[in-house]
Image (cartoon, rainbow, N blue to C red):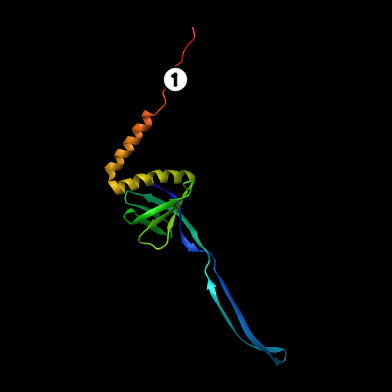
Amino acid sequence: WRGQGQFHQAGRGAGKYVGSSQGLSMPIGGGLRYRVGAMRGTFVSGDPIQKYAEVGDVVLTNQRVMFNGMFNTKEWLFSKWNGAAASSDETDYIFHVSNRQTTSGILFSRSDGRLFNRFLAVALMAAEDGIESAMAAIRKNAKEITSDKPAIPALELEA
């Protein structure tokens, strides 16, 4: 499967410096003052957030999900896959892999996100059980869908 998505990764919001200063100011004449002092404090990091970056191509295979953009290229191998999280509308995905300390993911349009979700399920099945097993499950689902169609009602004509 191939589509468009926006890459995002874990980061932090804006931080701030929290501290105080103290000192002494003395007049030295002619309207001038001499100041001696010190500052002390610490930097407080911002809250953890997902930082959205660029839009690029997303490629899904039976071994990995890849993002290819102008500035970022990422891959999430299924062999290192720990799990994923998706938004309720199936547009935003966060992937957890064992070789990274921070999470990252892809934001899709609504139509691409739903399609990606369906293909991701099949790709994970193929990665775990093999392609033939995934194809057998697809054939079974297709057969169930066609056999579950409602019958066209017969029209009774009054004489």
Seen at 29% across and 38% down, the residue is 136
Badge 1: few (under 14), some or many (20 or more) residues near its Cα, within 10 Å?
Answer: few
In this rendering, position of residue 29 left or right of residue 42: right
Seen at 62% across and 83% down, the residue is 22
Check the image and name the residue furthest to the bottom: 29
Seen at 67% across and 88% down, the residue is 25
Residue 6, relative to residue 159: is it above or below? below
Residue type marked 1:
Pro
- For label 1, the residue is 153
Residue 151, image quadrant: top left
In this rendering, position of residue 13 left or right of residue 104: right
Residue 125: image location, x then y, percent: 32, 46
- Number of residue marks: 1
Residue 7, image quadrant: bottom left
- Comparing 80 with 51, the one in front is 80
Check the image and name the residue furthest to the top: 159
Residue 60: image location, x then y, percent: 36, 49
In this rendering, position of residue 134 left or right of residue 52: left
Residue 43: image location, x then y, percent: 53, 73
Residue 115, relative to residue 51: is it above or below? above
Residue 149: image location, x then y, percent: 40, 28
Q: Secondary structure at mark 1?
A: loop
Seen at 35% across and 55% down, the residue is 81
- Comparing 70 with 148, the one in front is 148
